Image (cartoon, rainbow, N blue to C red):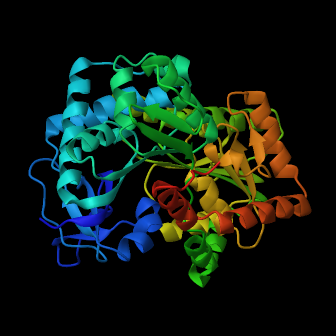
Amino acid sequence: MRQSSLVVVANRLPVDDTVAPDGAFEWRRSPGGLVSALHPILHDKPATWVGWAGGTGDAPTLPDVDGIHLHTVPLSADDVREHYEGFANATLWPLYHDAVEQPVYHRRWWEAYQRVNRRFAEAAAQAAEPDAVVWVQDYHLQLVPGMLRALRPDLRIGFFLHVPFPPPELFMQLPRRAELLLGILGADLVGFQRSQAAHNFAQLANRVLKLPATDRRIAVDDRVVRIGAFPVSIDTAEMEALARRPEVVQRAQRLRRDLGDPQKVILSVDRMDYTKGIEQRLKAYSELIADGHVKVRDTVMVQVAVPSRERVEQYQILRDRVEREVGRINGEFGRVGEPAVHYLNQPFDRVELAALYRAADIMAVTPLRDGMNLVAKEYVAARVDDAGALVLSEFAGAAAEFQQAYLVNPHDLDGLKLTLMHALEASPQDVSSRMRAMRGHLRTHDIQAWATSYLNALVPGASPAA
């Protein structure tokens, strides 16, 4: 099989299966996200992406995409149910997000997690040239670095966690905590979104594994594993260019007309996930209406909730609760042709998202916990007019970079209401000053800068970001 000097290992391949005009299925590169960050680097050298194509059964053979070789890892229906929906998203996801929902522990899920991680590690070992660099991504594959080091000790192995890493008192709940830590420590460099996550990880390595550890280095046998913060970002230039397109500007204007030409538009764009604070945000908005601080005709809220993990019971329950709350608010405060909340439970393409960002006076990004939250960064990038107010949760990773946002504790309902009112009533000068500062930061801390800083740190002798 083909081997590469750089191998990216992620749960999903950077392609989507789409239906061509003639009805045939074809595979196309996914827009945005990790693939946009790595594409310039992967395109310049022999590179392979190891991942799952999204279906069950035999792995499809896929053509190269923009010169990047795709190595497909097969998953069975049991693998998807027990590894992806089970251990990854019903055990690790809630645990790593402050146990907003109670994590569920099943021994068979752990067995599936081991089995699938081993499959990914073996695929990466086959795809990598001697002394190649392998970059493993995220919480689905935390055992891969250790397994891969056992298979291929010649490799330079990096691991990056896109979600938060919890404090020791939460992580200690995990029944197989030592095995998971050892799996991650198979890497030469472990990257996190925030320095606090690196600190948590170092504390656990010392407490659980009795390893000498600082917030930058952990001694493992005769190796030193380096750790650091590398905040992930977006393709800033791409979003700016999209937001400037005449059809996007026109679409934004039409959206405001369709919403009744209100004085203010509040927008939220989230995956349907219990970590995103959707219910708290809706409750705060409904209380602002009930208290008379907001009038439905003058202020409109648009809540986009993109479907997510719809086979997981917790997500089905959440969707029902959100839709009940939207119905209650509209039934109590809306009028014919004037709903208080415009609720959209559907995915949006990049053009429509950019238009929504341009149309919104207030962007409310208030997760209860988030590794980064790239929607906040997309909104800032899209506001090429230096307008628009970002209301941002203190518990999103983006808050460390966007100190000029209207920061809020989303668990504090009264504080959330006050912050929304502050943003709604802010002067254009205050809004513009804050937005210019955030946009200046984002231009120099885009997704290419993130990928380059991490990969430069992965080479011997480099130091991780502070």
> Of 240 and 165, which appears nearest the observer?
165
User: Residue 184 location, x and y as percent?
Assistant: 39, 36
Residue 5: image x %, image y %?
Answer: 30, 66
The outermost residue toward the left is 58
Q: Is residue 345 above or below residue 361?
A: above
Left or right side of 31 for 409: right
Identified at 26% across, 56% down, the residue is 50
Residue 436 occupies quadrant: bottom right
- Check the image and name the residue furthest to the bottom: 246
- Image vertical order of residue 182 relative to residue 31, above or below: above
Residue displayed at 64% across by 60% down: 379
**Residue 227 in the image: x percent, y percent?**
53, 42
The residue at 60%/69% (across/down) is 236
Q: Is residue 110 above or below residue 454?
A: above
In the image shown, does 55 or 21 lie closer to the viewer? 55
Task: Give the side of residue 442 with respect to residue 44, left or right.
Answer: right
Front-most of 300 and 212? 212
Image quadrant occupied by the N terminus = bottom left
Q: How many marks?
A: 0
Residue closest to the far front: 222
- Image point (46%, 26%), residue name: 95
Residue 328 in view in this figure: no
**Residue 406 visible in rendering:** yes
- Work out whether 375 lies above or below 46: above
Q: 204 or 171: nearer the eye?
A: 204
228 relative position to 144: left or right: right
